[in-house]
Image: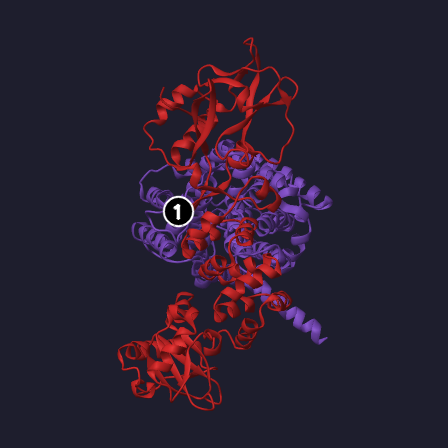
Chain colours: A red, B purple
Amino acid sequence: MAEQLLYFTELISMPVYDLKGRRIGRVKDAAVVPLVHPSRLDRILVGGEFSWLTLRYDQIRSISLDEGIHLNDEQLVPYHDDEYMLRLSRDLLDQQIIDVTGRKVVRVNDVTMAIVQENGRDILAVLEIDIGIRSIFRRVLQGVMPPRWIRRLQRRIPPNSISWEFANVVEPDPQRRLRLNISYSKLEQMHPADLADIVEELGPAEREAIFETIDSEVAAEALSEVEDLKMQANILESLEPEKAADIVEEMSPDEAADILNELEEETSEEILDEMDSAEKSEVRELLDFRDDSAGGMMNTEYVALHDNATVNDAMAALRGSEDLLDGLNTLFLIDGEERLTAAVPLARVMIAEPGTRLKDLANDTLIQVPVDEKEDRVTETFDKYNLLTLPVVDEDGKLAGVITADDVISVLRAR
Amino acid sequence: MKALLSRFRYHLAVFFAVLGPGFITAVVDNDSGGILTYSQAGARFGYLPLWTLLPITVLLIIAQEMCSRMGAVTGKGLSDLIREEFGLRITFIMMALLVVVNLTNVMSEFAGVATSLELFGISRFISVPLAAAAVWFLVVKGNYQSVEKIFLFACVFYVTYVISGFLVKPDWKEAALYSVKPVLLLEPAYIYMLIGMVGTTIAPWMQFYLQAAVVEKGITAKEYAESRIEVIVGCVMTAVIAFFIIVACAGAIYATGPKDIKDASEAAVGLKPFGQYAFLLFSAGLFNASIFAACILPLSTAYSVCEGLGFESGVNKRLREAPIFYFLYTALIVVGAGVILWPNFPLVKMILLSQVLNGVLLPLVLIFMILLINKKDLMGEWTNSGWVNAASWFTVVFMIGLTLAYVAISIRGV
C-alpha cells in the first residue's frame, strides 16, 4: 500500500477509540522523543474526560483521516510533562527553525507526516516541516471545514516545505538541548556568511544558543560576517567569558579589537583575561588606536623580513606562518631597527630565482601611512594607488601593521 | 563631580545611540489625521481642549513603553511574539485587519499630501504620483540606518507648527491656564471632540512599528533605561506639537469666529490673515507629516505581516527572496496613492471603515500586549510590576472604551 500522508493540523482533535470502539477523547498534541527515534511520533497526547492521557506509538492499531485513531491496548497512562519530549504543537508549531539546506530561518506552519505500516500497526513518521502559503491556508481553515475539503482546495497552491532531516530546532536552554538531542553541528558545514545571515534573523537567546555550542573557529568566522558591529558585541557579551575568548582568539586581531572596543571596559577586560598571552597583546595594542584612524583599521597579520633576505629566506618564512597565507599578497622588508624599507609583491617572489635578493624585487615607490592617518585618507590612498595591502608605520617608521582591501571595503560599506 | 560628569556623558551617549524608534513613532502619530483632529479642536473650542493633552501623553507613554520594553528584552517584533504565543489563526486575522486599516491610513496620508500641495498650487496629479514614487524608492533603495536618519530629520520639520503657533500671536495666558484646567462642557460636540482626540492617539501600527524598530536597532535590556527616556521624550514632543496646532487654530480661527473645519488645509487657509508665513508653515507641516507617515505605514505593515506569517521580509532582501514583502509594500503605496487620483472615490467612507476596523483591532493588540508583557518565561524580571500593571490595564480598558465610543460616534456622524 502506498504511503499515506497526514498533516499535523489534521491529527489535532482527531477522535481516539479504544478496543471496544468507544471514543475516549481527542488528540491534543503529539511528541517525538529524539533520543529514542529521530522522526517517529512516539507519543500522542489525548484529552480525555478529566485529564490528558499519553498514548505510546505501539498502543495504536490504526490511524486514518476518516476513521480516527484506534487502539490495541487498554493500559493508558495519564500524561505528565516529560522533558525528553519534543511536543509538536507546543514546541514546534509557530516557532522559528533553521532550514539547513535552504540556509534560512523559517517559521513552522504545519508538519507533514507519513502513516507507515509496521508489524501490523500504523505508525506516524515526521516527514516535512511545512512553510509557505499552502500550510497557512490549512491552519487558518482547520476546524472550520472538513479536512477532505481543505485537502481538495489546497491542491491549487504549490507546496513549500523542508525535509525534517534538515530542519534544525533552536532551543536556548542547554539542558533541554541535551535531552532533545539537538546539536548545531550541521550548521558548522555552512558558509560563515550564510550562518551569519541566519543568526541575524534569530532572537538574542537563540543567537546565544548557537554561538555557545558551535566550534569556536566557525563561530569566529560567522561572527566576523555579522554585519552590525553592535550585534557582534551583543553576541560576544552574552557568552561566557571563556567561550568568548576562544572565539576572539580565532578572529583576526583587528576585527577582535573592533568588537572589543564596542563592549564595556569591564566585559572586554574579562574576555581579554581569558585569552592566550600572544593574541592578547596583539589585540591590546590595536585597542589603543582610534576606530577611524589607520591604526584602528589595521591588523597585525603580516610577514616581514630583514632587508638583506633572499627569495629562499622568504619561502622559509612563509612555510613557518601558514595560518597567514590565505589573504597574503605582499611581503615587507625592515631594517635593523625594524623600520619599514620596502614592499615586495608576492607574485614576483614566486617567479624569481631562489638566490635573488628581495630588495631587488621591491616596488619602486614605497607607499605607507602613519598610524594616526584618517580613515578617509586611507581609502583615498587605496583608490589612488590601486592597492591590495597598505603598510602602517608608527612615529619611528617601524612597521605597526597592515590594512588590507577588505578592511577598506568594510569601511566604505558602513557608510 | 568629575565621575558624575563622565557618567552623565556616558548616559547621554547611550541616549543618542538609542534615539530613533520611540521618537519617530510618537512624532508620526501626528499624521494628517491627527493634525485634522487637533485643528478641529482648536478651531471649534479654542483653548478649552488643551488640558486633555496631559492625560493623553501619559496614556501614550504607558502604551509605547510596553512595546519598546518587549522589543528590547525579547529581541522580537510584536507580530512574532503574537504568532509564537497565540498561534497562526489569530495572527492571520490580526494581520488581515492591520493591512486593511493601514491601507486606509495610507490613503488619508496621500490625501494629506495632495491637499497640502494644492495649497501651493501643485496639482494632485503631479504631487501624488511623485510622492508615491519617492516613498517607494526611499525605502527600497535605502537601508534602515539611512532611512532612520531621514525620518529623524523629518521630525525636525514639525517645528513649523511651533513657529506658526507663535506667528498667530495667540493669547498665551489663556493657553497656559487651560493647559492645566480641565473644562468639561456637557455639549455633545465637545465630548465627541475629546473622544476623537484620545481615539486618534494610539493606533495599532504604532505598536508594531515601535517594537520592530527597537529590535532592528539592536537595543538590549541593558540600554533600556535610556530607551525608556527616549520614548518619554518622544511622547512629550508629540504633545508639544499638538499643543501648538491647537493654539494656532485657536488663535487664528476660534478667535475670529469659531467654526467647524472639514479638512486640515482649511485650517491652513484660516491662518492666512496672520501673514503668509503662518499659512505656509502650517501647510508645509501638513505635507511633511503626511509624507512621513506615508513612508512608515506601508513599510511597517509589510514587515509586521511577513514576520507574523513567516514570509521573508526586509529591504535588504532581493525581490526574488522576499516576493510577498515587496508585493505588499508596493501594493499599499500604489493603491493608497491611486485612489486619491480616482475621481469620486468614496474616501470618507473608506476612512470611516478604517476607524471601525481600528476599533476592532486595537483592543486585540492592546490585550495581547499586556498578556505578553506579563509572561514570565518571555520577559523574566522585566514583566510589569504591580502598580505599572494596574496603570497598564487601566490604559488598555480606557483606550478600548474610548476607541469604541469613537467608532460609534463616527458611524452616527455619517
**Residue B258 showing in the rendered view:** no
The residue closer to the viewer here, A207 or B69, is A207
Which residue is located at x 64 percent, y 31 percent? A81
Instruction: Residue A246 in the image: state x and y as whole percent.
Output: 55, 62
Q: The disc numbered 1 marks a residue on which chain? A: B
Q: Is residue B24 left or right of residue B118?
A: right
Instruction: Residue A192 in the image: state x and y as whole percent.
Output: 43, 56
Q: Is residue B297 left or right of residue B21?
A: left
Vertically, is B297 above or below A312?
above
**Residue B228 showing in the rendered view:** yes
Q: Is residue A90 left or right of residue A9?
A: right
- Pointer 1 local density, CA inside 10 Å: few below 14, some 14–19, many at least 20: many
- Disc 1 element: helix
Q: Residue furthest top?
A: A20
Vertically, is B358 above or below A226?
above
Q: Is residue A402 left or right of residue B190?
A: left
Vertically, is B290 above or below B347?
below
Label 1 belongs to which residue? Answer: B111
Instruction: Residue A410 in the image: state x and y as whole percent.
Output: 41, 67
The residue closer to the viewer here, A311 or B303, is A311
The C terminus of chain A sits in image quarter: bottom left
The residue closer to the viewer here, B384 or B344, is B384
Instruction: Residue A187 in the image: state x and y as whole percent.
Output: 45, 49
The N terminus of chain A sits in image quarter: top left
Q: Which of the 4 quarters of the picture holds residue B200?
A: top right
How many tags in the picture? 1
Which residue is located at x 50 percent, y 44 percent? B205
What's the amino acid at mark 1? Ala
Which residue is located at x 47 percent, y 36 percent? B97
